[in-house]
Image (cartoon, rainbow, N blue to C red):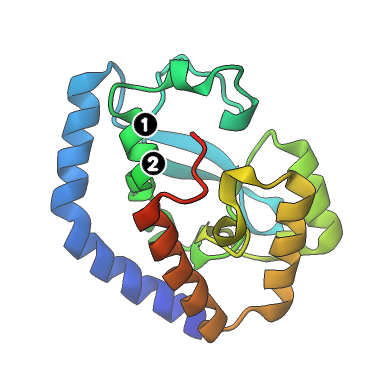
Amino acid sequence: MMKRTFDVALALLLILIFSPLALLLWLAVRLTSPGPAVYWSNRVGKHNDIFRMPKLRSMRIDTPAIATHLLENPSQWLTPIGAFLRKSSLDELPQLWSILKGDMSFVGPRPALFNQDDLIALRTARGVDQLVPGLTGWAQVNGRDELPIPQKVLLDEEYLHKQSLIFDLKILWMTALKVLTRDGVSH
């Protein structure tokens, strides 16, 4: 209950602070590439339930619906401002809506794409599917895009057993540092 209260309060505060920037970014996406500014991705949530997660669109509208690291040349699919959005993590701003709605938390395992069967199966076997997915997580601050899936799942499982408000605050602080230094972002 405390985690949910924290999530809602922080999400509301950040929406107030970042609304002008989000509006400018929305406009920039619309002006630099065809298609909607927000991309709704089918993601795996708690108990492996599918939910729709919003992101500012950083990829072309004809990009295959697979994990970016599985694309042969991910940069060819980026919109003109896509690289900036991804490296700055500003494409994640609409996920504040998912946090308010309760589909996500600030901290938890990153929500898998609906078709990442290997990741979903490993998380389910380790009990990680019992967690609400997060905007950031223990795996993100320990390697993000650079980690192989089994290692990500082990870190997600470690979070499952160690989760607390203090641990969440530590992960949020580490995330802020990683985002500011763009550490661990490969595309």
Please, what is the three-letter code of the amino acid marked with disc 2?
Lys
The residue that appears at 35% across and 29% down in the rendered structure is 82
Please, what is the three-letter code of the amino acid marked with disc 1?
Ala
Q: Are marks 2 and 1 in contact (CB under 8 Å)?
A: yes
The residue that appears at 67% across and 47% down in the rendered structure is 147
**Of helix, strand and loop, which one carries label 2?**
helix
Distance (Cα) linking label 2 and label 1: 6 Å
Residue 68: mark in rendering:
none
Residue 141 rendering spot, x and y as whole percentages: 55, 61
Relative to residue 44, is residue 134 depicted above or below?
below
Residue situated furthest right in the rendering: 125
Q: Which residue is mark 1?
A: 83
Q: Which residue is mark 2?
A: 87
Neighbour class for label 2 at 10 Å: few (<14), some, many (≥20)?
some
Q: Is residue 18 left or right of residue 61?
A: left
Q: Is residue 67 visible?
A: no
Neighbour class for label 1 at 10 Å: few (<14), some, many (≥20)?
some
Q: Is residue 93 left or right of residue 137?
A: left
